[in-house]
Amino acid sequence: MHLRYGNHTIRIAQSQATEIATLPLPILGSNCIEPLPLSNAAYSRIQSFDVWQDPLFKFGIAYIQIDEPILSQSARDLYDELFKLTRGAYLYRIWNFVPDLNSGEGDKERYRQFSIGRSSSFQEEFGQQDTTRMPAGTCVGIHGEHMVICFLAGISTPDHHENPNQIPAYRYPRQYGPKSPSFARATSVSVPPHHYRFISGTAAVMGHESMGIGNLEEQVEITCNNIELIANQTLESNHTPCEDQSLYSCKVYLRHASDFEEAQALLKERFPQSEHRFIYLQSDICRKELLVEIELCFQDLVRQPHAL
């Protein structure tokens, strides 16, 4: 099953379909299909969410038209529904798409308003101090007038990971908004025969500060360094040996479409064996000074024990 990008409007299959949905983010390369680790999943509609579920995974997607004065409440309402849907399961990955993500000044910025609603829902569900249930996450812009939230959950217990070179997003200082972003840098989970490693939307941030301002090449380099560090941590934390490590999917979000050729060349040089998996999309990013954000998923084949 998969998602498609590039359409001018949101389309949801609302059936037991191979292509679950199409989302309106402009494609900058030739690849527009993102695979999802579900197979022959049963479809249902539960409140605002279209949901697909197989024996191992549950995937859900919801969208709502943006209402500026109550954006934070709309985000909270959808997250409240998400948590009800996933009780008894574990969250592995959440994707958030908000139109005109950087519009508004100061704390009125849409991203900050979204973060208020998301954080409030997390705290209501899991407690004020509990950050252990926050999975890998991404929040970027989307075309149109609808906020979209997608999640992937399952019954296997995951591990959540942080980058030692970055302050956890949920610990960011007040300068980034009234509520800090609610996500972990990565989530890993074994769902035999595979071990999945979900790397959050990652950018050129060290500590909590944006780096390489105005310099795409420097931002790509720092972003890739962050990705490699957290990806290695997720692999090292896996106590089940893997015999094959494979990039399952990768999305590269670029603020400016004009940066596509340079970004593609830089990433092809950095990851020459994986370039065919990359999806390049034009999208706003959580901080106005950031030019690129990258997220990945690895699907590692778990080594089977030899028969005696």
Image: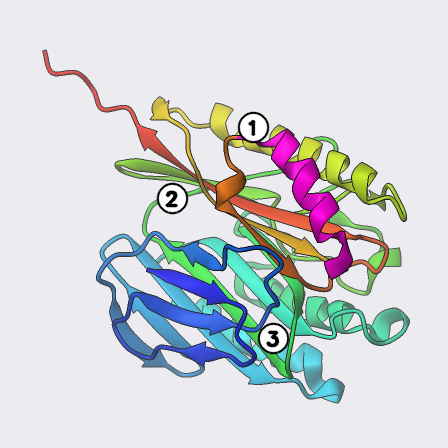
- Please tell me which residue lies in front, 176 or 121: 176
Q: Which residues fall within the magenta stretch?
A: 257-272
Tell me which residue sits at (70%, 52%) in the image. Answer: 260
Examine the rendering and report whether any part of residue 57 can be seen: yes
The quadrant of the picture occupied by the C terminus is top left
Q: Contact (CB < 8 A) between labels 2 and 1?
A: no
Magenta stretch contains residue 109: no
Residue 173 x, y percent position in the rendering: 84, 51
Q: Secondary structure at mark 3?
A: helix
Examine the rendering and report whether any part of residue 240 can be seen: no
Residue 181 x, y percent position in the rendering: 70, 57
Q: Secondary structure at mark 2?
A: loop
Q: Amino acid at mark 2?
A: Thr
Q: Main secondary structure of the magenta part?
A: helix
Q: What residue is pinned by disc 1? A: 233
Q: Amino acid at mark 1?
A: Gln
Magenta stretch contains residue 269: yes
The quadrant of the picture occupied by the N terminus is bottom left
Mark on residue 76?
A: 3
Q: What residue is pinned by disc 2? A: 157
Residue 85 x, y percent position in the rendering: 39, 70
Q: Earlier in the sequence, mark 2 or mark 3?
A: 3
